[in-house]
Amino acid sequence: MKTIKITYYVTTAIISGMMLFIAFETLTKPEVKVSMAHLGFPDYFRIELGIAKIIGALFLWLPVRILREFAYAGFAIMFASASLAHLVVGDPSSKVIAGMVFLAILITSYACHTKMQKTNEVSK
């Protein structure tokens, strides 16, 4: 159980920390504006995405189950969509793989969280 708990906290910290870092870049760096246009997205979507990343990173840590579930679902869709968008426009495979790596980390976090919840329910 201790290994699952450590894995959960590490993977969740990686995802939320990275999302906060990327959100800051998404909202402030002009290069991201160019990159989003390259992928075919309008500029307002960049701002929405940056704000959603901040909210999702916070929701991952809240004890409110529905909010955490929305964050997991939103990030899963975002990582899969990012990989697909990079693939469709012909970007290097490293950009496609990056989204899949973060999706794998997210799935690990979710799986560990689910196991911890089940263990807590059984022990009550």
Image (cartoon, helix red, strand yellow):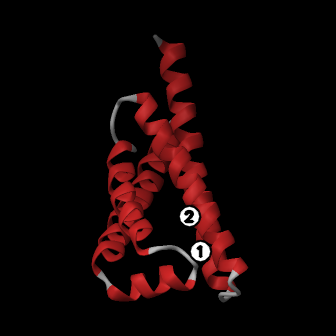
10 Å crowding of disc 1: few (<14), some (14-19), many (20+): some
Residues at marks 2 and 1 touching, judged by CB atoms closer than 8 Å: yes
Q: x%, y% of residue 80? A: 64, 61
Q: Position of residue 35 (x, y in %)?
A: 49, 85
Q: Amino acid at mark 1?
A: Ala
Q: Tag 2: residue type?
A: Phe
Q: Spatial distance from mark 2 to mark 1, Cα to Cα? A: 6 Å
Query: What x and y, as percent, mark residue 2?
Result: 47, 39
* Residue 65 placement, left or right of 27: right
As drawn, is 10 to the left or to the right of 21? right
Q: Secondary structure at mark 1?
A: helix
The residue under label 2 is 102
Judging from the image, what secondary structure is the residue with disc 2 in? helix
Q: Height in image: 100 above or below 12?
A: below
Residue 19 pos. (x, y %): 39, 63
Q: Which residue is mark 1?
A: 98
Vertical side of 63 occupied by 30: above or below: below
Residue 2 in view of the camera = no
Residue drawn at x 55%, y 45% as measured from the top left = 73
The residue located at (65%, 87%) in the rendering is 91
Q: Residue at x 43, y 54 (%)?
A: 10
Residue 87 lies in quadrant: bottom right
Whether residue 32 sits left or right of residue 41 in the image: it is left
Q: Specify whether residue 4 is in view.
A: yes
Foreground: 6 or 75?
A: 75
Depth check, front residue: 98 or 115: 98
Does 102 sit above or below residue 7?
below
Q: Nearer the viewer, residue 66 or 106?
A: 66
Q: Residue at x 33, y 37 (%)?
A: 62
